Image (cartoon, helix red, strand yellow):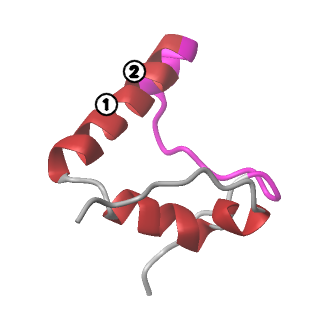
């Protein structure tokens, strides 16, 4: 049986949970390829980011989660 993939234009598919489900559906190789793609994109946009130490969140811009 083949899996039917569809394109969704529903905003519900943009939730963090939906993105996590999508990422979890990838194979390890696909996850690493995606991670490397994002890393390359960030470094090409801002090569100096590797020099940043003790980065802090900007209130209202980024949600940083911590394990308590």
Range covered by the magenta-colored residues = 45-61
What residue is pinned by disc 2?
Answer: 40
As drawn, 12 above or below 23: below
Residue drawn at the location 44% of the way across and 69% of the way down: 21
Q: Nearer the viewer, residue 47 or 27?
A: 27
Q: Residue furthest right?
A: 60
Q: Are marks 2 and 1 in contact (CB under 8 Å)?
A: yes
Q: In which quadrant will I find the C terminus?
A: bottom left
As drawn, 12 above or below 51: below
- Magenta span main SS: loop
How crowded pointer 2 is (Cα within 10 Å; few <14, some 14-19, many 20+) is rated as: few
Residue drawn at the location 35% of the way across and 38% of the way down: 34
- Number of numbered discs on residues: 2
What residue is pinned by disc 1?
Answer: 36
Q: Quadrant of residue 14?
A: bottom right
**Does residue 26 appear left or right of residue 21 in this picture?**
left
- The Cα atoms of the two marked residues, 2 and 1, are separated by 6 Å
- Report if residue 51 is visible in the image: no
Q: Residue furthest bottom?
A: 68
As drawn, 41 above or below 20: above
């Amino acid at each position: 049986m083949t899996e039917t993939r569809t394109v969704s234009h529903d905003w519900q598919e943009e939730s963090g949970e939906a993105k996590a489900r999508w990422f979890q559906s990838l194979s390890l190789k696909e996850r690493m390829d995606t991670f490397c793609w994002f890393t390359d994109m960030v470094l090409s946009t801002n090569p100096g980011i590797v020099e940043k130490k003790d980065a802090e969140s900007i209130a209202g811009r980024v949600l940083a989660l911590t394990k308590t």
